[in-house]
Image (cartoon, helix red, strand yellow):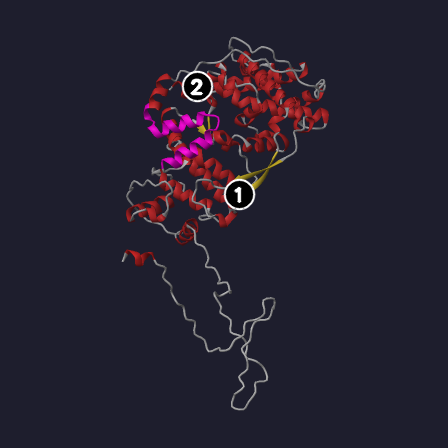
C-alpha cells in the first residue's frame, strides 16, 4: 500500500462542447479557429459562419463602490440629529472616555449631557466631567451647534475659559483646535491667548501673531508673544518673579508699540519694514489632531504661510534690549535695588521710554491710591470760599510727569531725532548672572514614583538622540500608541509639576537634567 502511494496518479478532465471538428490554427496566425461547415445541413449552406464562443472568466464591468462610512462621519450625522435635544433636569453621572461619543454614554449619562449642554449654551457652566466637555467641543469643531463661525469660535473660547482651571488638559488640546478652527473658517482673530496658554504651540502661532501685531495691530501685542522675540529669559529675573511681574507684563508690550510708532513716524517704515525677515514658508498644519473630527468637512490639513519674524537678528536684538531697558526703568520706579548691565540703546530712545513709563506708572499708582481729596457736599459752599486752599489740596501730589496728555506724547516723539545707525549690526546682549535656582527635588521624586515602568521607559527613550523612533518602537511592542504614552505622562506632570514635560515629541529643555537624575 505504501508503494501505491509513491506511484503517480492522473486525473482526466473532460471538456464537453457542441463544437466538433475545430481545426487548430497555425502557430503564427492571429485569427481564431472557426468550426468547419458541415457538408450536410438539410441541403442548406450557411452564408456566414457561426461566431466563435468565448469563455468569459470574469465580469469586466466595474461595480459602483458603496460610500465609505467613517466613525467620525457617523458622529457628525448623529450630532446634527441631536443638535436641538435638551433635558429640563438631570442628575450628574460620572463619565470617562478617551474619545467620547454618544454611543459611549448610558441613558442617565445622556440625560445629564443634554441638560448640561443646554445650560452651557445659556452661559451657565456647571461642574461636570472632562469627557462631557470634550464631547461638546467635538460637536463645535465639526460645525454642529452654531451657524456663524464667529459664534462657534466664541463658544469654544468660553468653554476653555470656564473649565481650564479645573482641567489642565484643556490647555494641551483646545488651543490648537481653536487655532485650527480660525484657519479653516478664515477668522481674523488674535492668537495671543492661545500662545500664552498653550506652551506647545508657541512656534508657528507665535510667528503669525508677531507678524500681525508688528504690522497691523501693535496695540494688541502681548507679553507672552513678544517673549518669542527676546534672547533675554525674563522668567529667571528675580524682579519678574517677585514684585515686578504685573508691571513688566503690562508695560513691555506698550514700550514695543511706542518704539514701533516712533520708528514709523521718523523713518516712514515700521520695525518689520526696517528689519525685514525672510520670505514666508508654507507650513502644513494637520487639523484637529487627537479629536473626533470628520475630515470630509474641512480636509486633512491646511497650508499656512509663516514668516520667521523672530529669526531676524537685528529686530530680535532690538526687542531684547527693550525688554531689559523696560525692566531697568521699572526697577528704578518701584525702588528695587540692582540694575541689569550692558544695555546699549540710543539716548533719545532711552529718554522717550523713561518719560513714557514715568508718566504711565505714576498715574496708575495714584489712581490705585484713590483721590487725594474727598469733598463733603455739605461743606462745598465753605470750601469754595477758600479756593486757594482747595486748589492747593487738589494739586499737592500732582507731579509734572503726570501732565502729559497723549497729544503731548506724540509731539515729544516728533521732536526726537531718528535712531542713529538703526540698520547697522546691533551689539549682542550680555548674558546676566541673575537666575533663580529651581528647587524641585521633592516634586521630582513624586513625579518619578507616579510613573509606571512603561512610562519611565518612554521618557528614557525620548532622552536619546533618536527619541521619537525609539518611542514608536516601544509603544508598538507594548500594544499602545506613542501619543497615548505622551498624554499619560503629561497628565501626571501637570498634576505634580504643574507643567507639561513633553512638547510634541521632545522633552522640555528645563526638565532634561531632572529626568536624567531620576
Residue 494 appearing in the image: no
Instruction: Identify the residue shown where x is 53% and y is 39%.
Output: 285
Look at the image and say whether residue 117 sits in the magenta stretch: no
Q: Quadrant of residue 341?
A: top right
Instruction: Identify the residue shown where x is 47% and y is 35%.
Output: 175
Label 2 Cα neighbours within 10 Å, binned few <14 / some 14-19 / many ≥20? few
Give 26 or 391, whichever is nearer the viewer. Answer: 26
Residue 301 marker = 1
The answer to whether residue 387 is above or below residue 304 is above
Counting residues from the start of the chain, the first of labels 1 and 2 encountered is 1
Residue 221 marker = none
Which quadrant would the C terminus be assigned to in this image? top left
Label 1 Cα neighbours within 10 Å, binned few <14 / some 14-19 / many ≥20? some
Residue 513 marker = 2
Q: Residue furthest front?
A: 3
Magenta segment, which residues?
449-478
Residue 277 as seen in the image, left or right of residue 112: right
Give 292 or 361, whichever is nearer the viewer. Answer: 292
Residue 7 x/y as whole percent: 34, 58
Amino acid at each position: 500500500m505504501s508503494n501505491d502511494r509513491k506511484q503517480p496518479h492522473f486525473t482526466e478532465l473532460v471538456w464537453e462542447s457542441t463544437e466538433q471538428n475545430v481545426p487548430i490554427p497555425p502557430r503564427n496566425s492571429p485569427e481564431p479557429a472557426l468550426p468547419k461547415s458541415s457538408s450536410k445541413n438539410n441541403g442548406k449552406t450557411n452564408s456566414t459562419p457561426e461566431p466563435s464562443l468565448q469563455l468569459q472568466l470574469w465580469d469586466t464591468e466595474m461595480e459602483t463602490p458603496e460610500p465609505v462610512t467613517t466613525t467620525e462621519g457617523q458622529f457628525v450625522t448623529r450630532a446634527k440629529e441631536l443638535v436641538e435635544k435638551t433635558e429640563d433636569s438631570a442628575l450628574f453621572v460620572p463619565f470617562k472616555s478617551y474619545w467620547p461619543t454618544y454611543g459611549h454614554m448610558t441613558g442617565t449619562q445622556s440625560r445629564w449631557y443634554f441638560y448640561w449642554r443646554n445650560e452651557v449654551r445659556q452661559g451657565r457652566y456647571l461642574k461636570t466631567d472632562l469627557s462631557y466637555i470634550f464631547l461638546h467641543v467635538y460637536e463645535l469643531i465639526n460645525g454642529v451647534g452654531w451657524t456663524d463661525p464667529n459664534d462657534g469660535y466664541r463658544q469654544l473660547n468660553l468653554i476653555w475659559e470656564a473649565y481650564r482651571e479645573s482641567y489642565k488638559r484643556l490647555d494641551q488640546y483646545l488651543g490648537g483646535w481653536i487655532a485650527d478652527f480660525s484657519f479653516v473658517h478664515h477668522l481674523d482673530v488674535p492668537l495671543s491667548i492661545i500662545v500664552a496658554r498653550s506652551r506647545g504651540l508657541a512656534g508657528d502661532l507665535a510667528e503669525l501673531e508677531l507678524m500681525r501685531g508688528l504690522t497691523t495691530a501693535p496695540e494688541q501685542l502681548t507679553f507672552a508673544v513678544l517673549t518669542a522675540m527676546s534672547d533675554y529669559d525674563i522668567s529667571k529675573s528675580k524682579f519678574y518673579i517677585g514684585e515686578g511681574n504685573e508691571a513688566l507684563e503690562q508695560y513691555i508690550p506698550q514700550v514695543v508699540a511706542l518704539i514701533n510708532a516712533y520708528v514709523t513716524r521718523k523713518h516712514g517704515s515700521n520695525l518689520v519694514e526696517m528689519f525685514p525677515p525672510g520670505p514666508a514658508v508654507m507650513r502644513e498644519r494637520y487639523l484637529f489632531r487627537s479629536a473626533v473630527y470628520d475630515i470630509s468637512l474641512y480636509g486633512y490639513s491646511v497650508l499656512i504661510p509663516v514668516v520667521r519674524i523672530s529669526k531676524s537678528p537685528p529686530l530680535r536684538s532690538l526687542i531684547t534690549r527693550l525688554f531689559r531697558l523696560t525692566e531697568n526703568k521699572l526697577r528704578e520706579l518701584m525702588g528695587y535695588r540692582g540694575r541689569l548691565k550692558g544695555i546699549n540703546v540710543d539716548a533719545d530712545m532711552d529718554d522717550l521710554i523713561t518719560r513714557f513709563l514715568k508718566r504711565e506708572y505714576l498715574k496708575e499708582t495714584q489712581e490705585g491710591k484713590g483721590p487725594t481729596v474727598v469733598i463733603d457736599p455739605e461743606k462745598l459752599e465753605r470750601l469754595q470760599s477758600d479756593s486757594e486752599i482747595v486748589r492747593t489740596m487738589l494739586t499737592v501730589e500732582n507731579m509734572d510727569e503726570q501732565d502729559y496728555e497723549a497729544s503731548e506724547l506724540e509731539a515729544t516723539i516728533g521732536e526726537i531725532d531718528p535712531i542713529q545707525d538703526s540698520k547697522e549690526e546691533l551689539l549682542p546682549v550680555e548674558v546676566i548672572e541673575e537666575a533663580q535656582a529651581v528647587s524641585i527635588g521633592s516634586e521630582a521624586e513624586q513625579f518619578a514614583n507616579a510613573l509606571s515602568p512603561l512610562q519611565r521607559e518612554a521618557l528614557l527613550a525620548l532622552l536619546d538622540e533618536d527619541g521619537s523612533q525609539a518611542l514608536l518602537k516601544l509603544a508598538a511592542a507594548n500594544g499602545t500608541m506613542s501619543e497615548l504614552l505622551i498624554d499619560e505622562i503629561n497628565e501626571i506632570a501637570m498634576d505634580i509639576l504643574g507643567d507639561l514635560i513633553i512638547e510634541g515629541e521632545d522633552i522640555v529643555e528645563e526638565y532634561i537634567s531632572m529626568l536624567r537624575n531620576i
